[in-house]
């Protein structure tokens, strides 16, 4: 479980919004070692991403996170807006 | 000449090779000798292959024939290793339905890759939601995340 504080850098209502995230927590690591092996790894991470609106309620957001224990993560997020879109 | 070479190699052996990422021991600064002696993970093959660094009772290396991510994409190791992360993601997606929680503004699902430039590459999968507060673009994002090491790690 990771808890991040996110800040939209550009205007939140724009079609493409850049954002940063800072957070920390526990990431689960699944390994194939003598069967399945699940461990929890703690860490802190800082990220930068850009979410682009796709349709009325869907967004696509590529993001990169750099963290400690030293790692770098590239992710593609799909998000669904639970708020009803404005008129 | 041999003596000179041995002395030079001793210097090389004492040099840190990485921060532990490539050799499967994150957070540790390893010398080449330590890398071979204490870190016989999948990344062991990244260590120098000089006979002197191999222990007599070392198990044979298991080098995947394809890169892990390629294997993952082809779906060979997904079913068993992904069971845990899938449960986590489903839990994240179901969390907004729990009535006592504040309503999220966005439900998110993420896939990606960690450490693609190092030997310890992993696939990542996660899910969570984002709750905005105020009107200046600040939000809290609880997320369940898992990193999958899709190759056999032999010790």
Image: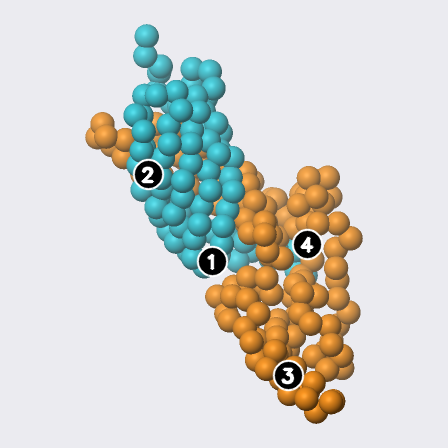
Chain colours: A cyan, B orange
Image coords of residue A21 (percent x, y): 36, 42
Residue B132: tell me if it is visible.
no
The residue carrying mark 4 is: B151
Evaluate if marks 3 and 4 touch, with contact meaning CB atoms under 8 Å apart. Answer: no
Q: Pinpoint the chain carrying mark 2.
A: A
For label 3, the SS is: helix
Q: Pinpoint the chain carrying mark 4.
A: B
The quarter holding residue B141 reads: top left
Q: Which mark is residue B8?
A: 3
User: What residue appears at the point 68 percent right and 54 percent down from the top-left corner?
Assistant: B151
For label 2, the SS is: strand
- Neighbourhood count class around disc 4 (C-alpha, 10 Å): few under 14, some 14–19, many 20 upward: many
- Neighbourhood count class around disc 3 (C-alpha, 10 Å): few under 14, some 14–19, many 20 upward: few
Of tags 4 and 2, the one toward the viewer is: 2
What's the CA distance linking mark 3 and mark 2?
51 Å
Evaluate if marks 3 and 2 touch, with contact meaning CB atoms under 8 Å apart. Answer: no
The residue carrying mark 2 is: A6
User: What residue appears at the point 55 percent right and 61 percent down from the top-left corner?
Assistant: B21
The quarter holding residue A47 reads: top left
- Neighbourhood count class around disc 1 (C-alpha, 10 Å): few under 14, some 14–19, many 20 upward: some
Of tags 3 and 4, the one toward the viewer is: 3
Query: Is the C terminus of chain B in the top left, top right, bottom left or bottom right quadrant?
Result: bottom right
Of tags 3 and 1, the one toward the viewer is: 3
User: What residue appears at the point 39 percent right and 53 percent down from the top-left corner?
Assistant: A44
What's the CA distance linking mark 3 and mark 1?
31 Å
Of tags 3 and 2, the one toward the viewer is: 3
What's the CA distance linking mark 1 and mark 4?
20 Å
Among the two numbered marks 1 and 2 on one chain, the one whose residue lies closer to the N terminus: 2
Task: Give a yes or no on whether discs 3 and 2 share a subunit.
Answer: no
The residue carrying mark 1 is: A70
The quarter holding residue A84 reads: top left
């Amino acid at each position: 479980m990771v808890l991040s504080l996110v800040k939209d850098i550009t205007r939140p209502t724009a079609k493409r919004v850049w954002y940063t995230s800072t957070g920390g927590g526990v990431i689960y690591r699944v390994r194939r070692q003598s069967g399945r092996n699940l461990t929890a790894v703690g860490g802190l991470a800082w990220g930068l991403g850009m979410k682009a609106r796709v349709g009325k309620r869907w967004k696509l957001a590529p993001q990169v996170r750099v963290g400690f224990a030293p790692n770098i993560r590239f992710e593609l997020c799909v998000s669904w807006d639970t708020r009803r879109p404005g008129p | 000449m041999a003596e000179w070479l041995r002395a030079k190699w001793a210097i090389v052996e004492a040099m840190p090779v990485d921060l532990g990422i490539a050799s499967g021991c994150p957070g540790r600064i390893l010398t080449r000798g330590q890398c071979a002696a204490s870190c016989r993970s999948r990344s062991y093959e990244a260590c120098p292959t000089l006979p002197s660094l191999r222990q007599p009772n070392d198990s044979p290396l298991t080098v995947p024939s394809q890169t892990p991510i390629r294997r993952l994409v082809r779906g060979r190791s997904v079913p068993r290793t992904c069971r845990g992360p899938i449960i986590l993601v489903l839990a994240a997606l179901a969390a907004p339905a729990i009535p006592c929680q504040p309503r999220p503004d966005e439900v998110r699902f993420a896939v990606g890759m960690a450490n693609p430039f190092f030997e310890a590459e992993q696939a990542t999968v996660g899910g969570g939601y984002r709750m905005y507060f105020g009107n200046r673009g600040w939000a809290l994002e609880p997320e369940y995340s898992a990193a999958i090491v899709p190759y056999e790690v032999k010790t």
